[in-house]
Image: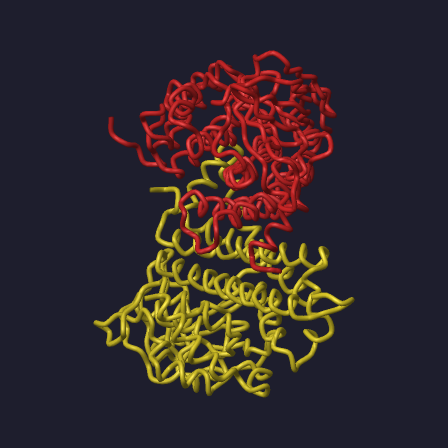
Amino acid sequence: MSIPSPAELRREVREFLAAERAAGTFEPRCDSWLTGFDPRFSRRLGARGWLGLTWPAEYGGRGLTPLHRFAVTEELLAAGAPVAAHWMADRQSGPTILANGTEQQKRELLPRIAAGQLYFCIGMSEPDSGSDLASVRARADKSRDGWIVRGTKLWTSHAHHAHYMIGLFRTAPLGPDRHAGLSQFLIDMSVPGITVNPVKLIDGSHHFNEVILDDVRVDAAALLGAEGAGWQQVTQELTHERGGPERYLSTLPLAIEAIRRSGDTPAARVVVGRMTSELWALRELSIQIASGRSDRPAALNAAITKEIGTRLEQTIIDYCRQLAGGEADPGSDDPYQRLLAQAMLQAPGFTLRGGTTEVLRGIIAGRSGLR
Amino acid sequence: MSELLTRTVLDILGSEPAPVAQEQAGRSPDQWTRLVAAGLDAIGYPEELGGPGGTLDEALAAVRAAAAAAAPVPLAETVLGTIPALTLVGASRPAGLTVPATFAATADVATEPAADGPRLRGVARRVPFARHADHLLVVIPAEAGQWRLALCAAATVRVTPHGNVAGEPRDDVDFTGSVPAALWELSDPARLRLSQLAVVARAAQLAAAGAQVLALTMHYAQERTQFGRPIAKFQAVAHNIALLAGETAVAAAAVDAAAAALDGPDAGLAVMAAKARVSRGAGEVSRIAHQVFGALGFTQEHPLHRLTRRLLAWRDECGSDAACEREVGALVLAGGADGFWPLLTAASARTQT
């Protein structure tokens, strides 16, 4: 099989999505990478080889470039396709396992992620640890044959569906170096001692959870990466998390419907032109990250992309309200009114998840060299 | 090659910044003479026409470096206006300074027949450095969507001086009655290319000046102490500088992408979107920098204004943010809702491979 170019792959995905839409498989959603949970759809993407596609073939991937993955993820998000089931696993957990995991972990888990069958949640935040991630208190203590994990994780998206959690736990007491003594674990969500309680979002939907780990016994092979290297691994992981197109495309399905309802007036041209210019320019920064063609460090570009992109996702809602009349209505038959409601009710999370705007500004200043 | 050019330009301009009087007059003959002596005003002019050759990337690198140095010189207008225009029509280069009306705010100039050959009629408004020019280039309409490029000696036109907020000459030029020294056929794609080059040039200047503003601001915030610590240690200041850094990163990516898109089929959207975005950010860059620098940056003595006055001027030149947004919006609305995403992705040369 010949290797497609990113542009060819983009066309393939676009055609597939058009066919799926025509067949009524899905309705476009805003923020579909969090709210569109559909295992059947994820498995279909896996069967086409569109998940884990940058990973080596021996782990179920295709050895393609980050620009290939960029093309696939952009098309899925722009179409508002239901991609939440596999999203964390494909974007974040898989690459972390690939970078830090044992051969056995990689062979056992990565092919199933790439097939769209295995889903992950991210166990970082806790009741008293949000932006200050290094303050996590959930801990893992060595036992005779493995580890005993205890503590509470919070705001854990899709913990109620996920097969595994990759969690950050304290494995040594807090010392002078707050970033030392943290480790990552791969936790099978089906083992005894794990309780998942729903935390409803403002629209009444269930994506968030509280995950209580009550003396959960895991074997030694559950450690991911090196003991005590959790902070470095998580920091690396957050670079994957921050620079991608889900940081500026969460409200694109709404923008498309707003343009559909807009007349071609001078005022509309300015609003559409501003929205388009902002999206186009920020997208070019994200492309620089995916293609590795920037003289700025990737972590800095990723923080900038997220800081600007997530505010843009929110501003797009206001551009759309200027362009198209009509009130938001979650239950409306009208796609614009429905998407507007989804966007408005999801928007507060855009500038929180994956590092708040305030945390990102600190990172941008620091990584730019401000001391 | 681009890195070498950047260093050369910075060496020439940085070793001796324009004296205050020249800076206020918007033109440094000293700096320009040094750039010309180094052959930097001819980057891109092909060897077969007697030039040194050079790529668009190299011309842009030189333009960026001169903008970062806030040099009051017509380098952008020359290497991204005059040189490409003469190259497109295969013409030899007149002696002295030739300025292109492709950088003007408007150029409403046409030919009319006369006994001694065609004469021009009409005015170009806000032509950069026109009062200092020996020759001027102006694009005029011909039949059936075709164009002509006219070269006029300065003595045949009337120049009314005006200036931008950086003090740079932006003069009205009345071509009425001028008998062009030369007149060439210009295809529509060639005309479009010249106008897009002017837009990309100003966008590149804005991005480069903004990056230099960021560097100055970072340095100052770590040096200036108040309340017993460097002001960079105050989160409110650091967060403003983070916004400034973000604007410069997006601007650099946008200009890079617009330049890469120039030869592609969707250059129009890329070029206009880049100028719109960079122009809109330029005001924010200037505002934040002045806020960090306090009263010091508000003085003539301090060099910050050499950059920020240019940001404030250039953002409205060769297409303001609002004007470019109108054009981008018209393109998108003409393509309809379902064409929006395909149009946006097509306008990126970086993902078309």
Foreground residue among A82 and A145: A145
The relative height of residue A258 versus residue A357 in the rendered view (above or below) is: above
**How far across and how far down the image is residue B45, in percent?**
30, 71
Residue at the image point whose x is 62% and y is 24% from the top:
A157
Total label count?
0
Foreground residue among A257 and A216: A216
Q: Quadrant of the N terminus of chain B?
A: bottom left
The picture quadrant where one finds residue B48 is: bottom left
Q: How is the image coloured?
A: by chain
**How far across and how far down the image is residue A58, in percent?**
32, 25
Q: Can residue A244 be seen in this view?
A: no
Q: In this view, does A350 lie to the left or right of B260?
A: right
The relative height of residue B188 versus residue B63 in the rendered view (above or below) is: above
Residue at the image point whose x is 72% and y is 65% from the top:
B229
**How far across and how far down the image is residue A44, in percent?**
43, 17
Q: Is residue B300 visible?
A: yes
Report which colour depicts chain A: red
Q: Is residue A289 left or right of residue A137?
A: left
- Furthest toward the front, the residue is A144
**How far across and how far down the image is residue A21, in percent?**
49, 19
Q: In which quarter of the image is the C terminus of chain B?
A: top left
Foreground residue among B262 and B215: B215
Q: Which chain is yellow?
A: B
The relative height of residue B202 versus residue A254 in the rendered view (above or below) is: below
The picture quadrant where one finds residue A62 is: top left
Residue at the image point whose x is 63% and y is 16% from the top:
A194
The relative height of residue A297 versus residue A130 in the rendered view (above or below) is: below
Q: Is residue B157 left or right of residue A323?
A: left
- Furthest toward the right, the residue is B227
Foreground residue among A228 and B147: A228
